[in-house]
Image: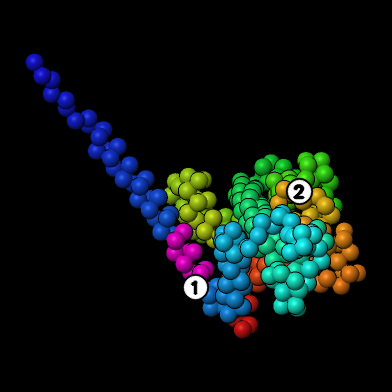
Amino acid sequence: MSQKHERSIFADVEEYESDEEFSAWRRNLRLWRSTLSEQWRLLTDDSLVVAAMAILGGFILLAFVAPVVAPHDPLERMYTESGLIAKWIEPSFLGGEGDFLLGTTAQGYDIFSQLVYGARPALLVGFVAAVMTVGIGTMVGLTAGYYGGYVDDFLMRLVDFVYGLPLLPTVIVLVTVLGAGLDSIILAFVLLQWRTSARVIRALVLSLRERAFVKAARVSGASNWRILSRHIAPNVLPMAFLYGAFAIAWAILTEAGVSFLGLGDPNSVSWGVMLQGARVYSAMTEGTWWWFVPPGVCIALVVISGFLIGRGYEEIVNPELQVEQ
C-alpha cells in the first residue's frame, strides 16, 4: 500500500525565508555593482587617470604575451657569429651587431627579452601584495571601527606596533630570514603595509556607524554582518581602492629595491634584478645606458600610473577636490 507524503506545514515558511535570503543577496550584489559603476564613471572622467589605466593595462598585456613578444629566453646567453659570447653589444638601432633591439648585458643576455619578461614578477608582486594588503587592512578597519571596545583597542595597538617598523629595512630583514624570492617579498610587504588602510578605514567606519541609516538598520533587527556588508562596506569601498592603487606602486618599488640589493628571486628576471645586474657590472661607468635606463623607465611608468589612479580615487573619496576643479 503506497503512502501519501503530506506537505510540511513549515514548507511555505522555509521557502519564504529562502526567497528572502536570495533577494537579500541580489540586493547586495546590485548595490555593489552600482557602486562600482559609479566609481568607474567618475574615474574615466579624468583624462590622466584614463592614460594611467591605459599604461598599466599595456604592461599587463605585455606580461601575458611575453613569450610571443620576447625574441629570446631572458636567461639564454647570446653568441656572435664567431661563436663568442655576445657581451656589451650595442642596440641594433645604434648600429650594434646582430638583431638585439636593446643590446646585450655583460653576461650576454638579451636586454629586450629581460625587459619584457621583467613585467611579470613586478606586476605579480604589485597586484597580489595590493589585494592582500587592502583585504587585511579593510577587514581590520571594519572590525575595529564597528565593534569598538576591547576589539578596537587590541587591533589599534597592533597597528601602532607595526607602524613603528620602517618599511624597506624591515622588508629586507624579513626577506633575508625567509629566503630570497617573490613570495617572501610579498609576505614581508603585506605584514607591514596593511597598517595604513586599516587605520584610515577604521576612522571612516567610526563615523559611518553613527549615521542615521546604520542606526535604523540596527533598530530594525539587521544582523552585524548585514549592516557591515550592505550599509558600511560599500561606503568604504572607494577608500579601499584608493589604498589598493597606492599599494601597487609601493609594492613594485619595494620589489625593485629589494631585488636591486640582490634579494630578489634568483630564478626569474625582474626590472629590479636588471638594475642590480647593471650595478654589479658597472653599466653606468661603461656608458651602457641601454641596460639600466629601460627598466628604470618601466618602473617609473608603472609606479606613476598607480599613483595617478590613486589620485583619481582620492577625488572620489574627497568630493571637495572635485568642487575645486
- Where residue 126 sits, quadrant-wise, is bottom right
- Identify which residue is drawn at 86% across, 66% down: 283
Q: Position of residue 205 (x, y in %)?
A: 61, 56
Name the residue carrying label 1: 41
Give the residue type at disc 1: Arg
- Residue 236 in the image, given as x and y percentages of width and height: 58, 59
Q: Nearer the viewer, residue 132 or 322?
A: 132
Residue visible at 57% across and 67% down in the picture:
57
Q: Is residue 132 visible?
A: yes
Residue named by callout 2: 266
Q: Is residue 178 rendered to the left or right of residue 206?
A: right
Residue at coordinates 57% horizontally, 55% vertically from top-left? 209
Structural distance between the alpha carbons of marks 2 and 1? 42 Å
x, y (%) of residue 21? 37, 45
* Element type at mark 1: helix
Would you say 172 lies left or right of 117 here? Answer: right
Crowd around label 2: few <14 · some 14–19 · many ≥20 (10 Å): few
Whether label 2 touches label 1, CB < 8 Å: no
